[in-house]
Amino acid sequence: MLGGLALVVAAAALVSCDFKRPPYAVLGHETGDHNCNDGLDNDQDGLIDCEDPDCIYESTWCGEFIPLVEPEYEDEPDMRLVKRYCRVNSAYYDLAKCKSAGKAILESCHDSMDNDFDGQFDCGDRGCSGVQENCCSKEFTDATCSDGRDNDQNGFTDCQDFSCRHGLFVSVCVENTDALCSDGTDNDGDGKIDCKDSGCQGTATCEGKDPENTDAPCSDRVDNDGDGLIDCVDKDCQLLEICLPDGKAEDTLETCSDFIDNDGNGYRDCADNSCRFSTDQGILDYCATMVEDTLATCTDGIDNDADGYTDCNDFSCNRDGAAEVVEYCANASESELAECQDGIDNDSDGYTDCNDFSCNRDGSADAVAYCASISETSLEKCSDGKDNDGNGYIDCEDWSCSQGTEQAVLDYCESIGENTFDRCQDGIDNDGNGYIDCGDWSCSQAEK
């Protein structure tokens, strides 16, 4: 039993973030669901099927079963032991027990067993995936979020996985274009398909209008799909070759009115200073007509100034418009308590409920209070060992704490951080996560 366990742990160690595939394998790699489920050591490396990091890393089979632990094996270590023994300011601080707890968690998270009998094992168990040093974050890129595999073995594949839907580097988990809203697939993994998805509201497909996603309708100066965006300003057109920067200077009437960011500087047509402040009167006259700052132009559902923002989502309406326009936009925002807890992006600005400034900052008193009550921003909530806002990150692991605005919280997170040269060689688990000095991920990213 112990020999087999050691072999499994050794295999799992290879799968950690230090595992690097050799440039070539003489006998090939053991990959694919068939090879990883045939009971054979196909590449003759001493590791069979799901014991082989090739299989855990590449196949989908190794996340399809839950191997239960044998009765005599110890239960999965409790993270509370880490919190208890590893925090220097704890009355129970004990360096030896801290190291033991951290090591035990690392081993139990790579033994291919469901130690706590909760139906999840290793990186599929939240207790393991929540610890960076376990290297469980395998599903956070466009490639891993669109390959049809449950790469991190947590039971959720691609866009059904929170790490894909909310990944900073993931762009494939959206459902907001005509193509994505008519493919019969729940592209963003929210349980709603095509026109039943709020992200598809306003698309031509769901409005019964002509799509705007090919060269012809994306260059005819007409809003074919009725979403208020014309030609290359429309996100459905922007990946077409005709809408990509062509290298031309944006200083003629033609290039200042073609809805293309010709010079690729991030500003299109009259939003570009070379057009807006041109010495050519014809260009100035044209740009004078491309404004969105009146009640009429801020309520017509059209992106009148072709800057990519429509009506009250445009600063020229909600901030710089006439007083009546600013007031209108304020009343049309997502700011009341009912709107700030209904799970709907009521003002269609891309932010829902308490993730929207109109709720958590500019909303009604009860809406702001509600958002504050569930946020993880205070010193109390950033040091209680709980994931108060339910986003999967605890205390200073949560950006709302470590990158917040409350100085006391920032000071606290800095004080427990293991991210300086001194703290990364003092033999102490400064941040109380069970990993000491260079064994802690944060030391590998230390700047001083």
Image: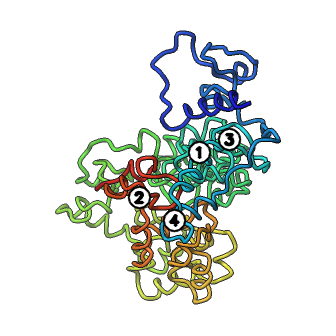
Residue lying furthest top in this view?
26
Q: Secondary structure at mark 1?
A: helix
Percent across and percent down for residue 139 are 58, 43
**Camera-side mark, 2 or 4:** 4
The type of residue carrying mark 3 is: Gln
Q: In the displayed structure, does residue 270 sit left or right of residue 5?
A: left
Residue at 49% x, 69% y is: 400
Query: Looking at the rendering, in which quadrant would you find the C terminus?
Result: bottom left
Label 3: how many residues lie within 10 Å, few (<14), some (14-19) or many (20+)?
Answer: many
Identify the mark nearer the N-term, 1 or 4. 4
Residue at 50% x, 42% y is: 216
**Camera-side mark, 1 or 4:** 4
Label 1: how many residues lie within 10 Å, few (<14), some (14-19) or many (20+)?
Answer: many
Query: Looking at the rendering, in which quadrant would you find the N terminus?
Result: top right
Residue under numbered circle 4: 87
> What's the distance in space between the residues labelled 1 and 3, CA to CA?
16 Å
Residue under numbered circle 2: 418
Residue under numbered circle 1: 106
Residue under numbered circle 3: 153
Percent across and percent down for residue 330 are 52, 83
Q: Residue 394 lies in what quarter of the image?
A: bottom right
The type of residue carrying mark 4 is: Arg
